[in-house]
Amino acid sequence: AQSVTQLGSHVSVSEGALVLLRCNYSSSVPPYLFWYVQYPNQGLQLLLKYTSAATLVKGINGFEAEFKKSETSFHLTKPSAHMSDAAEYFCAVSDMMNRDDKIIFGKGTRLHILP
Amino acid sequence: GAGVSQTPSNKVTEKGKYVELRCDPISGHTALYWYRQSLGQGPEFLIYFQGTGAADDSGLPNDRFFAVRPEGSVSTLKIQRTERGDSAVYLCASSPKGGTSYTDTQYFGPGTRLTVL
């Protein structure tokens, strides 16, 4: 069975500081990995996804994530936080070999940006 | 273009009642998904449609939950004899062809917040 674990349900960073949101996955087969963002009262929006083409994945809004198989991690980073980055972030995994496409989400990390 | 839309945005009902939640996917998307997001949790998969057929309904919690997509476009999630534990945000997503093996992106709607009193 696949799963993801997000470390820290709440993370606070100062505006301009590095953002690091941690995600570890568990999968018995090669995974697809995703980061989604959910702004208040809005739907989930895909930030980026890993599909085995490259281990460093660049997404929207300056975010990127690196797939590290040896650490089973897919941490999300952004060099400099903006106030507009305050939202809930979900790491997710899907089975590359399974075509029924369900995505397994983590519990989410709420990112707070301090002025 | 228009994204995924869901109606109603909020639904309050009483325990034991029947509810229907509607999802309008992006035009032309053949794959449609329902997820449920409880407070403080990530979304949980319920059911996946490829065209008109339910290709995977393994996430439906019990037989009170049912979903249809009769013409391969709009989908309705139906919940019978609602219980307080059904209270959650119900999310719908669509993708062009279906299958993350095709590296399709799932586009999510804003959700329907269901409250069962």
Image: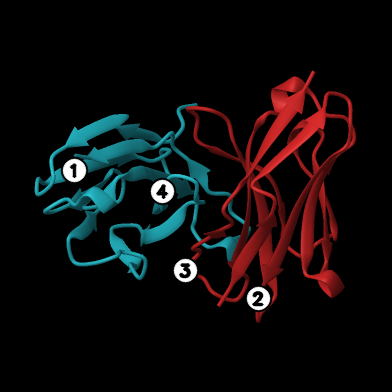
Query: Chain in cyan?
Result: B
Q: Which mark is residue A100?
A: 3
Name the residue: 47% across, 68% down. A100
Residue A111: which quarter of the image? Answer: top right
Nearest-to-viewer mark from 4 and 2: 4
Near mark 1 (Cα within 10 A), the count class, few <14, some 14-19 or many ≥20, is some
Q: What residue is shown with label 1? A: B20
Mark 2 and mark 1, same subunit? no
Q: Chain for mark 1?
A: B
Residue at horizontal 31 percent and vertical 45 percent from the top:
B73
The Cα–Cα distance between marks 3 and 1, rounded to whole angstroms, is 24 Å
Label 3: state its secondary structure.
Answer: loop
Q: Which chain is red?
A: A
Between B51 and B16, the one nearer to me in the picture: B16
Q: Amino acid at mark 2?
A: Ser
Q: Residues within 10 Å of mark 2 (few under 14, many from 20)?
A: some
Q: Position of residue B2 (x, y in %)?
A: 45, 28
Amino acid type shown at disc 4: Ser
Residue at the image position 24 percent from the left and 33 percent from the top? B11
In terms of secondary structure, where does tag 2 sit?
Answer: loop
Kindly indicate the quadrant of the structure image that contains residue A20. top right
